[in-house]
Image (cartoon, coloured by chain):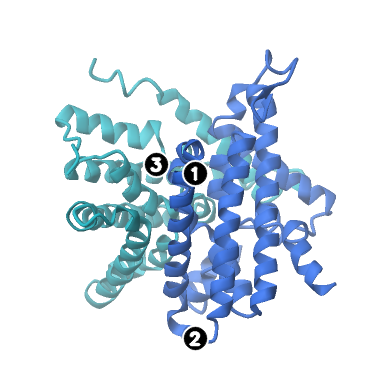
Amino acid sequence: MEALIHPDFKGLVVILMSAVFVNNYVLQKFLGICSFLGVSKKLDQATGMSLAVIFVMMLSTAVTWPIQYYLLNPNGLGYMQTIVFILVIAALVQLVEIVLKKYIPSLHSAMGIYLPLITTNCAVLAVTILNVDKSYGFLASMVNSLGSGLGYFVAMVMFAGVRSRMEGGETPESFQGLPILLVAAAIVSVSFFGFAGVIENLFS
Amino acid sequence: MKKLGILINGILKENPVLVLILGTCPTLAISTQASNAIGMGLAATAVLVCSNIAISALRKVIPDNVRIPCYIVLIAGFVTIVQMLVRAYAPALDESLGIYLPLIVVNCIILGRAEMFANKNTVWDSTLDGIGMGLGFTLALFVMAAIREIFGSGTFYGHPIPVLIDNHISIMTLAPGGFFVYGCMIAAVNKFSKGKAIKKKEFGCMGCPSAAACGKLSDASCGKEREV
């Protein structure tokens, strides 16, 4: 097994903070744009979707990381990563939905409608693959997933706020709908540049 | 003639990026350099053509209830093949595409075309559709990357451009520039087609290619998105 990164507590905080702010999945890495533009219309929907994403990201990391290091790598099947991961994520999402529906119907009605959307959300697949690419240890992977999910949450909530302000404004005809949303997203993503450099120097 | 129509359809009238608004994530992320855009476009085209052929050939075999998982497995298989080929023959491209290469699996264009076209049409038509859609994707990606590269880094395909190289606007190659240029391009398509072209005015359940599969269409939950 190749050398994995096992950072100390300080390192974990840096991973968490940089996943949330510097390498924000939505606004800096363009992952999960479809759901970002689709579900951010109302604040409550944005929150529900983000919580579901955080949950699925952490769960799929917890499952795919051991698969990669205890099943695929020892057997020389590293190239099966993409197929195995997407299937595991799809199966997990289905499983979670079934379990929620059966045992916690109240949570299912709040979060369940977002779950099927998550299977094809590239942010979830990306976080599991990136954790392996960066050879993070298990704990670091989980922290990175949590951070990525929180980053998605922050971006969604911020953008839901921006969108609610935009509704009253008058937009040129050809910019109505999607184009103005993308321009607004551009401005929101500028705001994240303010964090660049802050996190790396947090403890130095 | 009809065959040609299918091919052209994907490139212009139903351009996946600018008209159908599919595959936004790789479009925004990869379009910083024209060379990356071509590489990404061709990789996605290869996967799209292969998956369209396979899915339309198997359309009578795959049971309707489990078609989405079957499609995903097929697509993931082709993506893995492309990934290995790129890694072996174009390592520099592999480096610059990075995570977005395996993410072709969840690219909505591919699943979307499988669901919208390949499972209803013959192998030959689906092949043409795959080629057309793939070229349309590549073309849109290339135009967007060219705009961002020319203004953002003052180069085109790596070659410096006289005046712009000294006056480049670096934010164009960064994340905000991607959103901004994409927004402007959709607005331009809107303008020239007098608002007729863009079929998807809003993102929502209805626009999602897996909408039919997600089973929420009849639920009230999906309608919440739909009534916008």
User: Where, by quadrant of the figure, is residue A90 drawn?
Assistant: bottom left
Q: Which chain contains the residue that carries disc 1? A: B
Q: Which residue is mark 3?
A: A154
Q: CA distance from mark 1 to mark 3?
A: 40 Å
Q: Nearer the N terminus, badge 1 or badge 2?
A: 2
In front of the other: B10 or B196: B10
Q: CA distance from mark 2 to mark 3?
A: 44 Å
| Numbered disc 1: secondary structure | helix
In front of the other: A29 or B218: A29
Q: CA distance from mark 1 to mark 2?
A: 35 Å
Q: Which chain contains the residue that carries disc 3? A: A
In front of the other: A55 or B47: B47
Q: Which residue is mark 2?
A: B61
The hue of chain B in the figure is blue
Name the residue rendered at 42%, 42% in the picture: A25
Q: Nearer the viewer, mark 1 or mark 3?
A: 1
For residue A156, side relative to residue B136 (left or right): left
**Residue B89: image tag:** 1
For residue A111, side relative to residue B60 (left or right): left
- The answer to whether mark 2 and mark 3 are in CB contact below 8 A is no
Q: Nearer the viewer, mark 2 or mark 3?
A: 2
Q: Nearer the viewer, mark 1 or mark 2?
A: 1
The hue of chain A in the figure is cyan
For residue B166, side relative to residue B92 (left or right): right
Q: Position of residue A204 (x, y in %)?
A: 24, 14
